[in-house]
Image: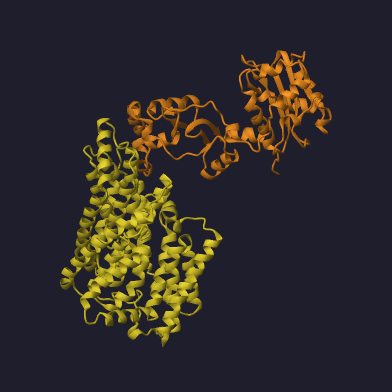
Amino acid sequence: MSSVHKEGMGLRQVLMRGALSLLLSGGVALLAYNADYTLPQILSCAVFTMTVLATLLFWEFRLAVAFLGIATLFGCNVLTLDRFVESCELPVILFLAGMMVIVGALKELGFFSWIIELIVSRRRMTGLAFSLIVMVLSALLACAVDEVTSIVFVCALVFQVCDTLRVPPTPFLIMAVMATNIGSAGTMIGNPGGLLISHRAGFTFEDFLVWAFPVMVACLVSAVGVLLLWFRRDIRALSDALEERRKQKLDLGPLVKVPYHRGLVIFVVTLGVIAFHHRAESLLGLEQNTLLMTAPLAIAGVLMVWRRERAKHYIEVEVDWWELLYFMMLFAKAGALEHTGVAARIATDFASTFETVPELLLPVIIGVSAIGSAFVDNVVFVAAFVPVVRELSSTPLWWALLLGACLGGNVTLIGSAANIIAVGVLEKRHRRGIDFMEWLKVGVVVGLVTCLVAWIALSQMADRMPEHPAHPHDGWGAWPAEDGRSEADH
Amino acid sequence: MADSTNGTSFASLFTCYQVLCHTPLTDRDELIREMVRALGPALEHGEVDDVVQAVLEREAQLPSVMAPGIALPHARLRGLSRLVVAVATSGKGVRFSDEDDGLARLIILVLAPHDSPAAYLQAVASLARILKTPGSADTVAELDTAEGVWRFFERGGLVLADYVCAGDIMRDEFISVRSDDTCEKAIDLFARHQLADLPVIDAQGKLVGLVTADALLRVCLPDYILWMEDLSPIINFEPFAEFLRNEGKTWLADIMSDDYVMVDEKAPAIEVAKGMCKRGVRQVLVVRGEELVGVIAIEDFIARVLRE
């Protein structure tokens, strides 16, 4: 399956995959037609399905397919320019761009080098300690910056230690990736899906700290237990290699005096502003999440003035415009699902199915989002399901969606951006990837255990959760879509 | 256009008239001129002076002593359509290089078409198979008649190889290190011989890895140090100082890579070019079974295939 993401697909493969995508999208359209969906609803379903399939079958063309899908929606009058601007979640995109600039500056200022040196310089390191450090660091970095940044830097740490000791890095990469995916559910900035949920559900950073972070910690603890047991032989081999290296009085890497202070200050200020955005917004009388969304931009702006000779580099290289444009198209298509009334109809079906046993909705949402995001990027799945959960108007379901999508990303090696990045780095560095089945075996176990923990934790906390407005801000992609009918139908 | 040499016997490339048996000439340039003249119509439209000039120019670049007592002066000529050969034997020997073994008793002049990269190499590869046997030059040089010399090659059943093998163009004298050597030795070799890569072998000569100068640098400058824009912490090569302190106890096994391109010595030489292009390496390692028997650097490849 890793070949899905490799370049250089043959013409025959392209044609076969293209035919499969068209067939499946057509199948979805046919199903929608049989279920008496309107034409705009059928089109938005088919285009969204095509976008999802593109991430699976045409990884390197996914943005191109996303562009074509948006053009189709415009051409068929399912989407208008105004609606596109409203539903492409520009605040989320700008937040991510700002964070990418900050992360780029932090990297250059030695902040991440300092963290890695702190670990590499530990004198009494053991395999167990290293595994725990890798997993906790991955989860916390994912919480504090984002999953992609976290895995990039933790990968560097894993390769530094494993390559120096000549032990296979794969088990430790898998540990890092799984902890990163779990950690990304801990805060709203952990992954773009969390950011989208916070934006659409009106959650603050503190809401995440209260309701998502503890569940994330519980999931992480259970996953750590599973992974330590699963990879016990590799951990023991690492301990032996560390002991051998210690006998030779050799370090795990060169140690230099990293000037980390400026980076640390920027990191603390950024995290501080994001963490206390809600209180500051209340104090300043600002609209909810205004400070949250603008803080990274403001800090990025300051950094670009301070390090003006690097400003262009930050914008042109550090900001992943490919991903951001893809997210914009994706969010706009999810918006089309919402305003055409598809989301409302699915939500109604969900609600009526579980009318008699509403407590089942929680595990169902966790399960569905976990299974879905095991095979497509979790952001794609969250984007698809946000309108549905919005219609269901139940706070615990938002957290179920977030956790299910993040935890499900661990099941397969294509489940999230972090997995794909780690496998890519491994292939580039060692010219060998990770076997799909090798990942799946441990992924299914970790996925099941963590989803179970998340379900238990959320069901215990559900009664204490306050109701959040499903439409926090007018004009932020919130369209009337009552009774399964949309504006477009009128 | 591919060179078709299937089953072409080496003896068919010349006749008894192109054999100068026991030549009295001792001057290299004069002998080459005589051999070119002996080719006569086989030269097609080539002028003797031009051909001699081309052979001597090639000889000036690198003496063509192939094995003790054997010289293979050669050139690639525009206008020539096929491989042509002249042979000379000398009782006293003709000096082709200043080295101790530079006195040749068997001289084989090979002229190949300019646009046929493989022709000369195929001829050399075929000759190497019998003439590398110790004493073979003397055996041929002591034959009394031109016909006897021609028959030597005819009876030997020497046939031009269908293609040039990696083993035909490899350098069989190369520098390697052992996996239980230290970085100190590798650095010495890199510095002294200006190498980019060093193959690593075990006690039995089996190829086990490759140490690159880049890998040595990356030990001192791992990713996490290169991320920093501010070079002040490493401006005086601080990571290198630590490395130097430990170079005597850092085994090459710890930094060698198993990411290298290797081909079997019998593999077509074009495999070497393919490996270099596809993997972006500048050196291909040649093995016999698991034993490292030679290396082919990109410079050698270009020189041998496009110029020799």
Q: Residue furthest bottom?
A: A490
Question: Is A330 placed left or right of A205 in the picture?
Answer: right
In the image shown, does A426 or A235 lie closer to the viewer? A235
Q: Residue at x 31, y 70 (%)?
A: A368
Determine which quarter of the picture holds residue B25.
Answer: top right
Q: Residue at x 56, y 61 (%)?
A: A11
Determine which quarter of the picture holds residue A345.
Answer: bottom left
Percent x, y of residue A72: 50, 74
Tell me what hue chain A is rendered in. Answer: yellow
Q: Quadrant of the C terminus of chain B?
A: top right
In the image shown, does B250 or B205 lie closer to the viewer? B205
Question: Is B196 placed left or right of A459 in the picture?
Answer: right
Counting labels gives 0
Question: Is A41 placed left or right of B287 in the picture?
Answer: left
Query: Residue B19, relative to residue A375: is it above or below?
Result: above
Q: Residue at x 31, y 81 (%)?
A: A349
Q: Residue at x 30, y 62 (%)?
A: A406
Q: Residue furthest top?
A: B92
- Please say whether residue A15 is visible from this viewpoint: yes
Percent x, y of residue B293: 51, 30
In the image shown, does B150 or B72 lie closer to the viewer? B150
Query: Residue A331, relative to residue B298: is it above or below?
Result: below
User: Which chain is represented by orange in the image?
Assistant: B
- Please say whether residue A473 is visible from this viewpoint: no
Query: Residue A75, relative to residue B260: is it above or below?
Result: below
